[in-house]
Amino acid sequence: MSLGLSDNRNRLRRRRQVFGFVARWGLVLAVGLGVGLWARNIGTEVANQEVRVLESRLFDITTESATLRSEIAGLTAALHAERDRVDERRARYEADVPNPQEMEILAAARQRIASGISNTRLNAVISLARDDVACESLGNTKRFIVNNEIQSGANGSVSFANGAITITASGEAARNADGQPVGWFDPAKPIVATFSHLGGETFQAEGLLPLHHAVAVGNREYRFSLVAGARAFVQVTGEVCPFP
């Protein structure tokens, strides 16, 4: 009888032990599962947070990139516009500023105006000028003495076209080794040439030799070239052309 009771107690004890063991491990598993689920939720939340941060940074970068592209486009357009303005100003400058050949014409026009020719007369002459005129020589080369502060008078003029145009000139006297003036002009210094027409008109040209000048009288234009000749002399050649 006591043996049966002992067996029952042993079986009951073993059941309690098995139940306790299962309960303990069930608790461990439950805790482990809970921790795992919590950790997974925490990891997911952290990952989502990082994704949100990255998305925000990507949005900021995209916005900044769009702003920079817009600014670059604006600067590029402004640069092109400035280049166009520079090209326009350069073209206007090149159109307005005379070249060396035009400067010579302008200087000659100013000289004529200074000698008393009106702008109206000068404009009319320029508008009628042509390059296909037939000119004729005024004959052989002539020479005359250039007057200066030491020498004047004798052989100091020449005439062309049967006396229609008379030419005289004055210049600065040359100097000897002691710096004293001598009786002939200095060809390295400017001279003043005077062209007198038989009708009373007088024209002047000033400059270094060789000196070229034209005198318009009526329907003719007399063109002269003055070059340095023998000491004290200037040589002159001329031609007459239809005018205008």
Image (cartoon, rainbow, N blue to C red):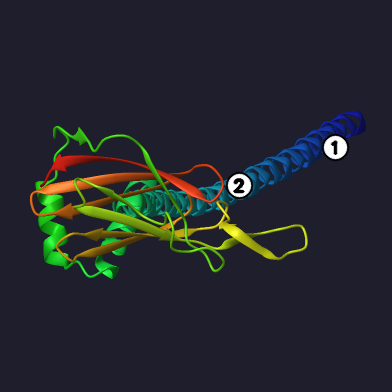
The image's mark for residue 89 is: none
Specify the quadrant of the image occupied by residue 142.
top left
Q: Residue 17 location in percent, x, y?
A: 84, 36
Q: Residue 24 location in percent, x, y?
A: 79, 41
Could you say which is closer to the camera, residue 188 or residue 132?
188
Residue at 43%, 55% (x, y): give it.
Answer: 71
Is the C-beta separation of discs 2 and 1 under 8 Å? no
Q: Residue 150 location in percent, x, y?
A: 57, 66
Element at badge 1? Answer: helix
Element at badge 2? Answer: helix
Question: What's under tag 1, amino acid-wise?
Answer: Arg
Which sits earlier in the primary sequence, circle 2 or circle 1? 1
Q: Residue 61 location in percent, x, y?
A: 52, 50
Could you say which is closer to the camera, residue 218 or residue 121?
218
Between the residue at mark 2 and the residue at mark 1, the CA separation in whole angstroms equals 41 Å
Could you say which is closer to the camera, residue 170 or residue 83?
170
In the depicted structure, whether residue 67 falls above or below residue 44: below
Residue at 27%, 68% (x, y): give it.
Answer: 115
The image's mark for residue 41 is: 2
Report the residue marked by disc 1. Answer: 13
Specify the quadrant of the image occupied by residue 11.
top right
Question: What's under tag 2, amino acid-wise?
Answer: Asn
